[in-house]
Amino acid sequence: MKNAAKRIYVFLIFVFLYAPIATLIVLSFNASRTRAKWGGFTLKWYEALFHNRDILQALFNTLLIALIASVTATVIGTIACIAIVNMKRRSRTFVMGITNIPMLNADIVTGISLMLLFISFGFRFGMGTILLSHITFCIPYVILSVMPRMSHLNQSVYEAALDLGAGPLYGFFRVVFPELLPGILSGLLMAFTMSLDDFIITHFTKGAGVDTLSTKIYTEVKKGIKPEMYALSALIFITVLVLLLLVNRAPDDNNNRKGSKL
Amino acid sequence: MNKTKKKMLGIPYFAWSAIFIVVPLCMVFYYGLTDAGGAFTLENILSIASPEHSKALWLALLLSLAATVICLLLAYPLAMILNGKKKNQHSFIVLIFILPMWMNFLLRTLAWQTLLEKTGVINSILSFWGLPSLNIINTPYAIILGMVYNFLPFMVLPIYNALSKIDPDVIHAARDLGADSVQVFLRITLPLTLPGIISGITMVFIPALTTFVISNLLGGSKILLIGNVVEQEFTQAANWHLGSGLSIVLMLFILVNMVISAVFDREGEGSVL
Amino acid sequence: MKKTTHFHHTLHTVILFWIVCTLCLVSPLLLTGCGSQGSKEGGEVIVYNWGEYIDPETIDRFEEETGIKVIYDEFETNEIMYPKLEAGAAAYDVICPSDYMIQKMIENDLLAEINFDNIPNSKNIGQQYFEQSRQFDPENKYSVPYCFGTVGILYNKTMVDETVDSWSILWDEKYADNILMQDSVRDAFMVALKLNGFSMNTLDENELAAARDALIAQKPLVQAYVIDQVRDKMIGGEAALGVIYSGEAIYTQRENPDLEYAVPREGTNVWIDSWVIAKNAPNKENAERFIDFMCREDIALMNFEYITYSTPNVAARELIEDEEIRNSKIAFPDLDQYENLETFQYLGADGDALYNALWKEVKSE
């Protein structure tokens, strides 16, 4: 009885989470341009998608930016964590406070303030400014994911490795890094996700001709969303879902260990 | 590596944050504390007291608080149930929750319009079965629903993460000592997951407080929230001074939140994943 | 501990990441600092236009025929476009703002005078539209009309059984929760001001207060304040009445034949979106060639059929095959037959602030 209740609960939540996604997928097959009525089943939007240079370019930009920004943010964030964990309590609180700011500030404020910054520095707006902005708001997510693991590190294991003759860098990569890896990976994932979906900040810091999917969709708000966008969303969803299922099937010896706390 | 070298590793980040976080922040403060002519003024900040602004802030607080509480009530049991599953499904579960966030935010919210409208999907299904229709579109309830929808994963994941870190031996020990389920929950599980809860509340409450898209699309643009005001001041009214002033007020909430986090979550254990 | 191979793999991956990241760290800075964009054969032109407001094929044709590369960017509202232009962050050549925004840009010295000798095809544009443009571009020096239209009431014949000829129907309690208003300060106030017989460009505080009160009184009856969603909602039968641009009317009628469009007798807004050239445009000549191309009758026809917004290009209008549309009063209103047609003017920073403050009061209710 209890198990059934649990299953129903989880099922309901998943329906809630995925209902809009299902709607989007259904709309991608709608022959009518408008979402207000069903005009019959069609695959023409999928076909149109692949001929639409602009959307594909925007997709490429989005992925490229998300990838570069999240990876860069992860690197900077992780090494920053090493530094932060070795700071005195006061400085640590101060730095963590600053770190929280982009995460907690309203998007539009971050976007406009970055735009003001770039203008006063005389930067030319384009892909570069978008990347700088994205890295800026991604780093906090990385730091917040890695810090907990960093604090829990057992220094003695590292020191033992050094005692046993390992060089400092080697010791780091063989002892410390694996402990941090889950945190780093989750930080990377969060950063990637936040970068993918961002609109406001990208809007204010982009240059002419550079579009991400988000900015492209928002500019269509006034006149109606192109159904090719629904098709694209459906494709992205199916692709990632398939990848997920595949990865989940692959054997993962780490997590089968009993008592593993990671 | 000695301590100084380790601290130096932070230099890239410190430099980065100085340029890209602190300087823009100073600019916001500059705009917020000056008027169009450049003279110092507190008017922008004090304008929060005007009837429209205070109402907008109050409504936003109410709605985001409601959304946060609902998220918490929904997320905790869910996290507990998911925690009971096998360990090797951990990444799968996490990714299943992140996946909807990879669909564009605007499209997802628009999809809710299609679902909730009078002539929308849900009401079509309900009327088919002869059930009364659901009329929450263009009301504050739809806004809360939109907030819960968009931010639920941010509440589930930190709690789930915190739960998974609890050593089962601690629970076993408590039971051995005679504690029943309720006591175990209240005295062990809840306190140990507190950092996760705080993190979840932060990741839901603050973004919900400043949202404007959700109130436009699902609230019929009839309900003016503080996020709408800031957005309008920056775009339509082109009054960056007022917009910045109001943002400074909002930062107060961020500060409060950071203080609470610091108090309850000393070790910085609350994390999303 | 863990397998050696797994570890070395991770190590190598990490090092690769380092290299990639260093490159990544460097490249954004290179991309930003760099100077001018590469010049190609024939050069380029940077266009900033509303979303979905051009037939993409016309751009392709332009590139083919002239060899000039088009960098095309889109915006969703005039107010979002303006700060980017004013700040000078991104350089644009050709922009397509609306009437009052053009006036604001002229007054803030953001536009370049157009050399009409370079735009011979502008003769295709009806003279009456240039005349109407004088309301915001007094000497017709800065703009070339691209699209125009009226604002009116779109209504569902099956849900509204009376004649629709007045703005007052939007205040009728019979249609509570079935009315859609535009989510735009000037459009909303236009309706309320016209209803009371005032000018939509008034700065008179009493008139504005009356309009504001009317809007507040109307609010309980309004289903939603929307911009583009009017189309989808009306097509779906979600609402009975909606304030809409004439350009959308044709499209919505195609999708749902129960819909009709009417221009109220109190008068309404005639809006014009025109091509302008930025003062600091890097490619002014190419900009003029682009505008000239857009004024060609076959190109204007293509755009009309794609966007369905009325074209001021009379030569293009002659080419429309469907007689019904060619003579449609909705698509091509006779500007003389209506009284009280006004075009939005820029009200100045103070005027804008006043309107915005009142709009906030309405929204806040």
Image (spheres, coloured by chain):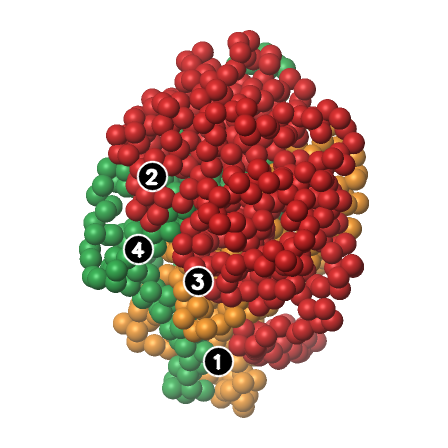
Chain colours: A orange, B green, C red
Write down the chain letter for disc 3. C
Write down the chain letter for disc 1. A
**Three-letter amino acid code at disc 4?**
His
Which residue position holds label 2?
C355
Disc 3 with disc 1 on a shared chain: no
- Residues B52 and C252: in front is C252
Q: How many marks?
A: 4
Write down the chain letter for disc 4. B
**Three-letter amino acid code at disc 3?**
Ala
**Three-letter amino acid code at disc 2?**
Tyr
Q: Position of residue B155 (x, y in %)?
A: 45, 47
Q: CA distance from mark 3 to mark 1?
A: 53 Å
Point 61% across, 56% down: residue:
C116
Circle 3 crowding by C-alpha within 10 Å: few under 14, some 14–19, many from 20:
few
Write down the chain letter for disc 2. C
Point 34% across, 39% down: residue:
C355
Point 51% across, 56% down: residue:
A203
Callout 4: SS: helix
Q: Judge whether residue C314 can be spotted in this image.
A: yes
Q: Quadrant of residue A37?
A: top right
B235 is higher (above) or lower (below) than C164: below
Q: CA distance from mark 1 to mark 4?
A: 52 Å
Q: Given contact means CB atoms under 8 Å apart, are the residues at marks 2 and 1 in contact? A: no
C184 is higher (above) or lower (below) than A253: above
- Residues C38 and C25: in front is C38
Image quadrant where one finds the N terminus of chain C: bottom right
**Three-letter amino acid code at disc 1?**
Tyr
Callout 2: SS: helix
- Residues B14 and C89: in front is C89
Q: Which mark identifies residue B241? A: 4
Sequence order check: which comes first, mark 3 or mark 2? 3
Which residue position holds label 3?
C87
